[in-house]
Amino acid sequence: MTSVSWVKFIAVIFRLLLHGRRSCCSVCGKAQLVHLPDFDNLFVNEHLLWNDQMDSAVACVSRCFFDTRCRSVQVDRISSRCSGHATAFASPTKIYPPANVSQHSRLYLLPRASHFIGSACTIDGDCHVATSVCNDGLCTCQIGSCFSPSQQACVTECSTLGSGLVRYPGYVISFHDVSIHSSLGETSCPQLCTGTCPSIEFDGVNNLCIINNVTFLSVGAAHQGQSNLWVYYQRNCAT
């Protein structure tokens, strides 16, 4: 990058972080860095690449831009805490478990987040990662697969499980229950899937959260089911 284009890049990012508006990035050609106001004052812990203190918000966004794994970045405008993420995001209502409150935090999508895992979608063709689909209004890996931040791809096995889950409405696994818990509704289930839990289901008929020791693809077809009254959640990969 030339010194002139670098100065332009810094100026654009600075204006964006100050005013919270879309702005063209000279380094990215006609692409745009996009502020997601629905995530203001929230901290997302999904697909986290780093969460460090940095000298400035500009340095934070620049770090994400030059890390090819990074698709979105969160900046605390007061403390300059910086977190880079390996996927796009679309809505805080699609984060499982929910994002945490974090005053002064702002979330931005880089141009390469478009059509990537986590992007909003209406059809499978909106999702450009191999074996990804439009699921529940988001681009996700096909049921049973998980997104790997290190491989930038959908994989069938994770070396380490992450903290977040992907929601797949209408799917169920039979005869692989580890434990069953009474629930106050579906939103109480994701918080129960921690530690070594690879997946959890919500039984909408009996209002139960069911923890499994398997994933959808690791069981035979006879144990894979579909029902509008059930919701299946699968843990993400950490790396």
Image (cartoon, grey):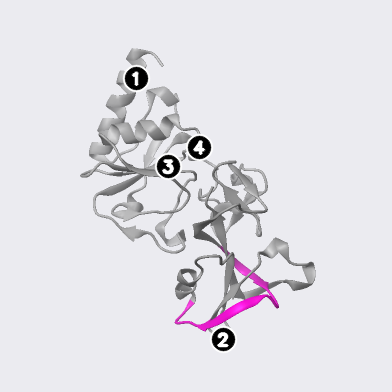
For the point 66% across and 64% down, the residue is: 215
Q: Residue at x 66, y 74 (%)?
A: 227
* Residue at 45% from the left image edge and 75% from the top image edge: 188
Question: Residue 84: which disc?
Answer: none
Residue type pointed to by label 1: Trp
Quadrant in the rendering for residue 51:
top left
- The residue under label 3 is which amino acid type? Ser
Q: Nearer the viewer, mark 4 or mark 3?
A: 4
Badge 3 or badge 2: first in the primary sequence: 3
Find numbered disc 3 in the image and state the secondary structure of the residue it sits on.
strand
**Magenta region: which residues?**
167-185
Discs 1, 2 touching: Cβ within 8 Å? no
Dot 4 alpha-carbon crowd within 10 angstroms: few under 14, some 14 to 19, many 20 or more: some
Residue 121, given in percent of the width and then of the height, sits at: 55, 51
User: Which is more N-terminal, label 3 or label 1?
Assistant: 1
Mark 3 touches mark 2? (CB < 8 Å): no
Residue beneath disc 1: 6
On the question of residue 122 being in view, the answer is: no
Disc 4 versus disc 2: distance between alpha carbons?
A: 42 Å
As helix, strand or loop, the secondary structure at mark 2 comes to loop
Disc 4 to disc 1, how far (Cα)? 21 Å
> Which residue occupies the foreground of this view, 116 or 63?
63
User: Which mark, by number, is residue 72?
Assistant: 3
- Residue topped by disc 4: 69
First in sequence, mark 4 or 2: give its number. 4
Name the residue tied to disc 2: 206
Q: Magenta part mainly helix, strand or loop?
A: strand
